[in-house]
Image (spheres, rainbow, N blue to C red):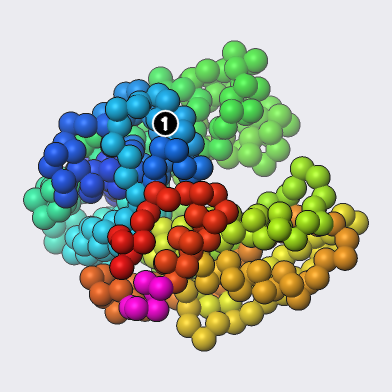
Amino acid sequence: MDAWANLRRILHVDMDAFYASVEQRDDPTLLGKPVVVGGRPNSRGVVSAASYEARKFGVHSAMPLAEACRRCPQAVFLPVNFPKYREASFHIRQIFLTYTPMVEPLSLDEAFLDVTGSTSLFGPAETIALTIKQRIQQELNLTASVGLGCNKFLAKLASDLRKPNGFVIVPPDRVQEFLDPLSVERIWGVGKKTAEQLHKLNIRTVRDLRRLEQGFLTRLFGIMGSQLYQLAQGIDDRPVESDRIVKSIGRETTFPTDIADIEVLETALLKLSVEVGRNLRKEMLKGKTITLKARYDDFRTVSRSRTLQRATDLDNVIYQEARNLLQEVSPKQPLRLIGITLNNLTDQMEAQLSLFEEPQQERENLIKVLDLVNEKYGDHSITRARLL
């Protein structure tokens, strides 16, 4: 009897060191060298991507660039080139859609695919997975790691085990054999603090976790305890959501001490604007309505919104509008929290004119945000010349 009968065939496709690999592909002199994408090593930014050569030195995404330089001073540090990465991501997504409409993008470089209904046309799920890997290699000269399982959790775990250029299948009748030896940190939801609690109970592998009673885990971790119990058994009923709708994207920060200084608040807004803009571009979305949230030291919360004529994902536009909204709030008392949210979102791919033709207004806005970053942080990692 077919072990896959009546079960989903889910792929998780994860590009290998995506941003860095695109840069190495486009500049062969970088092949075999440690490459760090994020900006200049003396800037205050963080690593967006690191090649596998750089990872050998302990460099990883979200690490401060200065720390990455300390660990790997011989690395080549490059600015982020989102148009280039979006172009490659769009091509990859078109490959996915050739084999199934059930595609759930998680970011520019990874997605879930449900190929359950595609096997009658394209053959077994493993054949589809290998074909997708081969097409990405042949058409884009990039590598992807793929996991195949009967649910999203197993597929995601599988794709991560043999990077780069890996392909791991989790047969339905060997799920526990696959899961049991893995460390508990591999389970979704097990962060540093949860792992420490589990380690105190001498729970270090999925096998150890699986042997606990659900009631015990629920008493220990609440609702998350039930989720941990289910995942340790390899149970995950979430479907691939091809029409996943992101309604809003936002970021907020709570200050260690209440802030009344308008310049400090505007600096915080700039950082939040950059983060929100980055996440919009990651999701390939633009937003039309900007909302500023402010919470005073007495916990009273107010918000102000403004709808733009044209949807945007540009840091500078978000920042300028948020700063105007802050002036409307006119805090007469210190703030303990401030946040920015964009909603009324639209698909960036539909909105943009071309991947290769940047409108003049957007180019000018990019220069403005560069000037703001230079002014606030002294970060000259992207020159004006690169934007003109």
Q: Position of residue 265 (x, y in %)?
A: 71, 58
Name the image quarter holding residue 323. bottom right
Crowding around mark 1 (Cα neighbors within 10 Å: few <14, some 14 to 19, many 20+) is many
Principal secondary structure, stretch drawn in magenta: helix
Q: Which is more toward the observer, 135 or 33?
A: 33
Q: Which residue is mark 1?
A: 68
Left or right, 126 with respect to 161, comes to: left
Residue visible at 67% across and 41% down in the picture = 223
Q: How many marks?
A: 1
The answer to whether one can see residue 219 in this image is: yes
Residue visible at 25% across and 75% down in the picture = 357
Q: Position of residue 271 (x, y in %)?
A: 58, 54
Left or right, 360 with respect to 1, comes to: right
Q: Residue furthest left?
A: 138
Q: Is residue 72 magenta?
A: no
Residue visible at 39% across and 42% down in the picture = 40
Q: Where does the magenta region start and end?
A: 359-364
